[in-house]
């Protein structure tokens, strides 16, 4: 109070008035109190008529005049907005026309039209527009605002989703493949893999000396948005050194593996629902096929005749009858025939049975040649010249077209070549990757070809027009190697890849 002397004076005046009222009659006191109550509602300080302050207040309030604009943008009509009324009107009409076109395309009911008032002229019957919880987007043309409620009924179509809903069975694989499972258990690069013929399961062969069986139905929770992890159901241990090749036998009851130790081992596929922590089952290990003197790099099984073919770094190609061997381990399993004994065509790297004629076997060599053998007559039939014009190029893998007498080869020179089994001549060749093409696989319908390379990518090719439909970066390099093998599931929409990074990946 000491700092505000005029208030102290007011307080002294009030006390004097109260003393005077005590000396007046009762009726006069009541009338005076009513007048005081009435006066109390008035401001204590007199109003100051300051023209400059009023002008400043009006200018400040005019800055917020847009808050009182209606849905169509009509505002207070001040000089700040009066000049661009026609421009805003034009933009507003364009925006409403765009919304009408979108509704016509999607078959949406038309929005009720609202008559537009003259731009820049305020409507006295409208109050300020209150803020709502709706989200607004900015018009990139006019800077106006439109509620998402006008666009909420619009839908966005993904072209990839359309590819997944196809009636033709041959187009079942015409889709975008996405990673689903990551198989982490091997300690070194995975050289080969093969799918179970019926179940969602596969076997991998690794340089760590083991093979592992994976049941894709038994997954382990992983990080959000990451590929699911799967634990192996069983680990096959018997090879002395890296396991280089694997193939599945008839009805997926047995699988066969070839290793650095020059041996081919037969394995019985255990129950897929078994506990992975159960003890060792000696009945899983079958007989041993011995005859090669060096690493076994390739295996192929023919279900029509129950024949097993193998190729080795010793230069030979052998045909076996694994069903005639005893279930126990033996070193005298029957070898039906041996080819390329003198290594006249070089060192074989891969082999496959012809789909058009199951009695024919195609073996690929480091020299760039592929030889067609008759497994029944035990003699070569035709030499397929897959060498490029620049010279010899090693063939890393060979596969057979599922429906035509055509052999497909993957080369070190980054190329893929298609060879006619009737003439031995190439019918098509293409540069497929940025590095050596290491592996190939064809889908069961004969529509797509999958290739893997040391450039860390998988590529899907349409067999009819030889165009690439999808590329997937799947593995990391290790010692300048990346992808060693790829495979299609025989009866399910699954593909898989094996890499030098000790991982196998499954895509759906």
Image: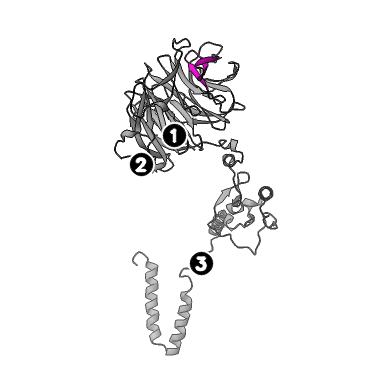
Mark toward the start of the polypeptide (3 vs 1) = 3
Find residue 176 and report its horizontal and vertical position in percent.
54, 36
- Up the image or down, 153 lies above or below 369; here it is below
Helix, strand or loop for disc 1: helix
Q: Is residue 501 left or right of residue 101?
A: left
Find residue 69 and report its horizontal and vertical position in percent.
61, 57
**Disc 2 marks which residue?**
274
Q: Residue at x 63, y 44 (%)?
A: 141
Helix, strand or loop for disc 2: loop
**Disc 3 marks which residue?**
47
Q: Are marks 3 and 1 in contact (CB under 8 Å)?
A: no
Residue 211 shows up from this direction: yes
Instruction: Please name which of the two marks, 3 or 1, marks the residue nearer to the observer.
Output: 1
Residue 411 shows up from this direction: no
- Quadrant in the picture for the N terminus: bottom left
- Up the image or down, 215 lies above or below 344; here it is below
Q: Quadrant of residue 461?
A: top right
* Within-10-Å neighbours for mark 1: few <14, some 14–19, many 20+: some
- The answer for how far apart the CA atoms under marks 2 and 1 are is 16 Å
- The answer for how far apart the CA atoms under marks 3 and 1 are is 100 Å
Q: Quadrant of residue 44?
A: bottom left
Q: Residue at x 57, y 42 (%)?
A: 161
- The answer for how far apart the CA atoms under marks 3 and 2 are is 93 Å
Q: Which residues are magenta?
A: 358-383
Residue in front for this viewpoint, 83 or 73: 73
Find residue 202 and report its horizontal and vertical position in percent.
43, 34
Residue in front for this viewpoint, 103 or 461: 461
Q: Are marks 2 and 1 in contact (CB under 8 Å)?
A: no
């Amino acid at each position: 109070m000491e700092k505000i002397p005029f208030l102290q004076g007011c307080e002294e005046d009030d006390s004097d008035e109260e003393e005077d009222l005590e000396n007046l009659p009762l009726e006069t006191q009541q009338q005076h109190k009513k007048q005081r109550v009435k006066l109390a509602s008035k401001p204590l300080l007199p109003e100051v008529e300051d023209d400059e302050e009023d002008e400043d207040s009006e200018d400040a309030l005019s800055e917020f005049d847009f808050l009182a604009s209606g849905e169509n943008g009509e505002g207070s009509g001040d000089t700040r907005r009066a000049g661009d009324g026609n421009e805003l009107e034009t933009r507003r009409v364009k925006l409403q026309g765009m919304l009408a076109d979108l509704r016509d395309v999607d078959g949406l009911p038309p929005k009720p039209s609202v008559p537009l008032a003259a731009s820049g002229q305020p409507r006295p019957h409208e109050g300020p527009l209150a803020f709502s919880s709706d989200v607004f987007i900015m018009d990139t043309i006019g800077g106006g605002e439109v509620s998402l409620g006008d666009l909420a009924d619009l839908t966005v179509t993904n072209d990839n989703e359309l590819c997944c809903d196809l009636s033709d069975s041959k187009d079942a694989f015409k889709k975008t493949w996405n990673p689903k499972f990551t198989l982490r258990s091997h300690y070194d690069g995975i050289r080969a893999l093969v799918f179970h013929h019926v179940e969602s399961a596969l076997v991998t062969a690794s340089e760590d000396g083991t093979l592992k069986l994976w049941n894709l139905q038994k997954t382990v929770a992983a990080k959000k948005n990451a590929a699911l992890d799967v634990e192996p159901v069983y680990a096959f241990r018997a090879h002395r050194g890296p396991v280089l090749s694997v193939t599945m036998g008839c009805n997926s009851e047995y699988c066969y593996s070839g290793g650095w130790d020059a041996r081919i081992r037969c394995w019985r596929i255990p129950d897929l629902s078994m506990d992975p922590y159960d003890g060792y089952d000696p009945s899983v290990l079958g007989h041993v096929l011995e005859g090669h003197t060096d690493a076994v790099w390739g295996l192929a099984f023919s279900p029509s005749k129950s024949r097993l073919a193998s190729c080795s770094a010793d230069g030979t190609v052998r045909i076996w009858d694994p069903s005639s061997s005893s279930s126990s381990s033996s070193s005298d399993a029957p070898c039906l025939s041996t080819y390329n004994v003198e290594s006249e065509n070089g060192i074989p790297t891969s082999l496959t049975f012809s789909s058009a004629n199951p009695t024919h076997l195609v073996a690929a060599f480091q020299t760039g040649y592929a030889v067609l053998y008759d497994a029944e007559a035990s003699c070569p039939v035709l030499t397929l010249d897959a060498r490029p014009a620049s010279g010899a190029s090693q063939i890393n893998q060979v596969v057979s077209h599922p429906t035509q007498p055509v052999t497909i080869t993957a080369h070190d020179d980054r190329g893929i070549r298609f060879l006619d089994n009737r003439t031995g001549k190439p019918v098509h060749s293409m540069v497929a990757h940025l590095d050596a093409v290491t592996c190939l696989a064809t889908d069961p319908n004969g529509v797509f070809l999958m290739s893997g390379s040391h450039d860390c990518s998988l590529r899907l090719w349409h067999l009819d027009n030889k165009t690439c439909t999808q590329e997937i970066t799947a593995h990391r390099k290790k010692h300048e190697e990346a992808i060693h093998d790829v495979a299609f599931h025989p009866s399910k929409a699954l593909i898989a890849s094996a890499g030098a990074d000790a991982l196998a990946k499954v895509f759906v």
